[in-house]
Image (tube, rainbow, N blue to C red):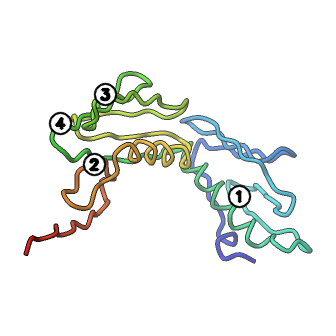
Amino acid sequence: MSRVAKKPIILPQGVAVEVSAEGVSVTGPLGTLQVAGHPAVGIEVADGVVQCKPVSGVAQANALSGTLRAVVANMVTGVSKGFERKLNLVGVGYRAQAQGDVLNLTLGFSHPIAYKLPKGVTATTATQTEIVIKGIDRQQVGQVAAEVRAYRPPEPYKGKGVRYVDEVVVIKETKKKK
């Protein structure tokens, strides 16, 4: 059995997990998330603890049980605490401004960028160079952060661009004339 799947998921106060034929639904104070189940993985909920166990006789049951356990654990964390990714803008004139469900970016192009945030994800800008993306779905928050970063990834010579707060950009030395 997968080492990840052996670890039980302890449900915090106010979080409920429902297992049905369609999949798993997790409800908490911040919202509701659903994921499709797999016939090779059995999910048991008892006394505030969720267990994912592989069904015997299926070749990939161990791997799938660990994966499904990690996904359900992220769903439990998302509906109870939520997830966030922080981005920094590095460069002269690089600015960001959140207006409702639109993130307006000025990244040195000849035109401004208006990024429409998907449903369930919010963005706040404490300063013009800091973006905080929040939501309950970990995958969706990470995808939005990656898409915003992709508009102007950090370049290796001056380090300008959109980067994650904890990202380290190694600066290259420029070519020297002889």
User: For mark 4, what is the residue?
Assistant: 93
* Residues at discs 1 and 4 in contact (Cβ within 8 Å): no
- Counting the numbered discs, the total is 4
Which one is earlier in the sequence, the residue at label 1 or at label 2? Answer: 1
Residue in the image at 69% along x and 67% along y: 66
* Residues at discs 2 and 4 in contact (Cβ within 8 Å): no
Say whether residue 152 is left or right of residue 58. Answer: left
The 10 Å Cα crowd at callout 4, few under 14, some 14 to 19, many 20 or more, is: few
Q: Which mark is residue 161?
A: 2
What is the CA distance from the residue labelled 1 to the residue labelled 3?
50 Å
Q: Amino acid at mark 4?
A: Gly
The answer to which quarter of the image holds residue 41 is: bottom right
Q: Position of residue 145 (x, y in %)?
A: 43, 45
Residue most extreme to the top? 100
At numbered mark 1, what does the secondary structure look like: helix, strand or loop? Answer: strand
Q: Which mark is residue 83?
A: none
In the image, which is nearer the foreground, mark 3 or mark 2? Answer: 3
21 vs 17, nearest the viewer = 21
User: For mark 1, what is the residue?
Assistant: 50
